[in-house]
Amino acid sequence: MKFAAWSSLVIGVLMLAQWTFFIAAGQVSELETEPIRIGFHLAAEAATAFALIAAGVSLLRGGRSAIALGLVANGMLVYTVIVSPGYFAQKGQWPLVGMFAIVLAFAIVSIVNLAKAARDR
């Protein structure tokens, strides 16, 4: 479960850092052109990031509901990494699309590990 814990924690922190960087650098033009849509998107991304961080911390501490939280948070991540790359693919930013594929792989490995741990309990 350490993989799931550290993966969740690192990805959650990096999600927040990435959005902070993009917003601070003025690279989120949708804040001006589509503020409602991007607002909802940012809320979903933040919820996912905070859920991942909480899951990572809980898994490292051995919390009672850590596995369930890890499964929910990584499920949220799977949705995000399937939906989000379309924006970057449309712009031809293929390295970022590749990054999402790698994150998806990490989420799937985490889910499999957490599901096995839940079954073994």
Image: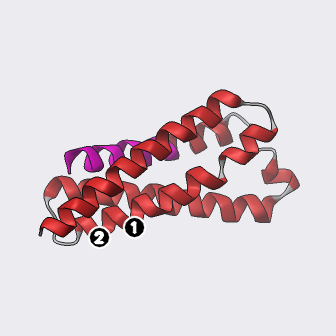
On the question of residue 90 being in view, the answer is: yes
Instruction: Decide which of 107, 7 is in the foreground and name it.
Output: 107
Q: Quick check: 84 above or below 92?
A: below
Q: Magenta includes 12?
A: yes
**Measured from the top left, where is residue 39 in percent x and y?**
70, 62
On the question of residue 13 being in view, the answer is: no
Give the spatial CA distance, label 1 vs label 2: 6 Å
Q: What residue is rendered at 22% in x and 60% in y?
A: 116
Quadrant of the rendered image containing residue 96: top right
**Measured from the top left, where is residue 47 in percent x and y?**
50, 63
Residue sticking out furthest to the right: 33
Q: Secondary structure at mark 2?
A: helix
Number of numbered tags placed on the structure image: 2
Q: Is residue 85 left or right of residue 101?
A: right
Q: What residue is rendered at 63% in x and 57% in y?
A: 42
Which residue position is annotated with label 1?
72
Q: Main SS of the magenta segment?
A: helix
- For label 2, the crowd category at 10 Å Cα-Cα, with few meaning under 14, some 14 to 19 and many 20 or more, is some
Which disc, if any, is residue 57? none
Instruction: Decide which of 107, 119 is in the foreground and name it.
Output: 119
Quadrant of the snapshot with the C terminus: bottom left
Q: What residue is rendered at 73% in x and 39% in y?
A: 88
The answer to whether the residues at label 1 and label 2 have Cβ atoms under 8 Å apart is: yes
**Measured from the top left, where is residue 25 in percent x and y?**
69, 33
Disc 1 marks a residue whose amino acid type is: Val
Which residue position is annotated with label 2?
68
**Measured from the top left, where is residue 13 in percent x and y?**
42, 45
Q: Is residue 75 left or right of residue 98?
A: left
Span shown in magenta? 1-15
Disc 2 marks a residue whose amino acid type is: Ala
